[in-house]
Image (spheres, grey):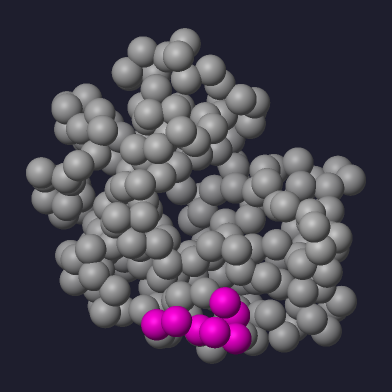
Amino acid sequence: MFNSLELTGRASTHVREVPELGCTLHVEVIEQLFAMQAAARDAGMELAIVSSFRDFERQLAIWNAKYQGARQLLDRDGRPLAHTSLDEPHLIEAILTWSALPGASRHHWGTDVDVIDRAAIARDYQPQLVPAEFAGSGPFRRLDAWLVANMPRFGFFRPYTSPRPGVQPEPWHLSFAPLAGPALEALTLEVLGTALHDSRMLGSEVVRARLPEIYARYVTDIDPPAR
C-alpha cells in the first residue's frame, strides 16, 4: 500500500493534485473527500482543506524554522513560548507538541487533511488552527459538531482528540482510516530512523538519542477510529 519512501514523505508517487479541492491527496482518498464536502455543503458549510500532503522537505523546513525561532512556538495550552527561554530538550518537546518530526508526519501519506468551514468566516479572516476556533463561540463550532456526527460514514476520524502526553488535540485534523491505519503500522521505528539518517534536521543528535520514546509518544499514541 505504501513503500518506505512514501511513508516518510520522500516520494510522492501515491498522491496527486486535486485542483477542485485545492490540495494534494492519496489517490484513494479523493472520492470520499469529495463526497464529504458535498454532504457538508448540503448542511450549509463550505468544507475547505487548508493543508493536505506535505513532503519530507516541507516538514523539515517547518521543524528547522521552529528550532531556530523563525516560527512561533506554543505551549500545551496554545500560548506563545519564548524561544530563548528553552534549552534544547525542552525546545524539541515544544516543537513536537504541535508539529510532527520530519518523516513521521501523517500528512506524508496523503490521507490526512486540516479542514475549516470557509462559509463561517469573513474573506479576510486568517484561520489559526487552534482548538478555540472549534469550540464555544469559535467560528468552526458548527463544523466541529457536524464532523463528529458525519465524518465516520466517509471513512474519516480525528487522530488527536484526547489530551495526552504527546500531540495535543487538533479538531481540524482529519485522517482517512482505511489507509492511515495500515500506514501507521508500516511506519516502524526502523523506517523512521532510516529517513532521518543524514538529514539536515536541527537537533538531530537529541532526537536520535530519544527516538524510541518520541516514536511511542508522538507517532503511535493516537485516538483510534470509532468502531
Instruction: Write the residue at 49% across / 70% down.
Output: 176
Where the C terminus falls, by quadrant?
Answer: bottom right
Instruction: Write the residue at 77% across / 67% down.
Output: 118
Q: Is residue 195 visible?
A: yes
Instruction: Write the residue at 72% across / 52% down.
Output: 126
Write the start and end of the magenta stretch as one range: 16-22
- The x and y percentages for residue 177 are 47, 69
Q: Report how many numbered discs are placed on residues in the image.
A: 0
- The x and y percentages for residue 16 are 39, 82
Q: Is residue 146 visible?
A: no
Please name whichever residue, 156 or 6, is drawn nearer the observer in this view of the structure.
6
Residue 177 versus residue 17 in the image, above or below: above
Q: Is residue 130 left or right of residue 113?
A: right
- Examine the image and state in which quarter residue 110 appears: bottom left
- Examine the image and state in which quarter residue 94 appears: top left
- The x and y percentages for residue 223 are 51, 50
Residue 185 versus residue 208 in the image, above or below: below
Q: Is residue 47 left or right of residue 182?
A: right
Please name whichever residue, 215 or 86, is drawn nearer the observer in this view of the structure.
86
Where the N terminus falls, by quadrant?
Answer: bottom left
Q: Indicate whether residue 4 is drawn in magenta.
A: no
Residue 82 versus residue 110 in the image, above or below: above
Residue 148 versus residue 88 in the image, above or below: below
Q: Is residue 208 left or right of residue 96?
A: left
Instruction: Write the residue at 56% across / 21% down.
Output: 81
Q: Is residue 60 left or right of residue 160?
A: left
- The x and y percentages for residue 47 are 71, 72
Please name whichever residue, 187 or 87, is drawn nearer the observer in this view of the structure.
87
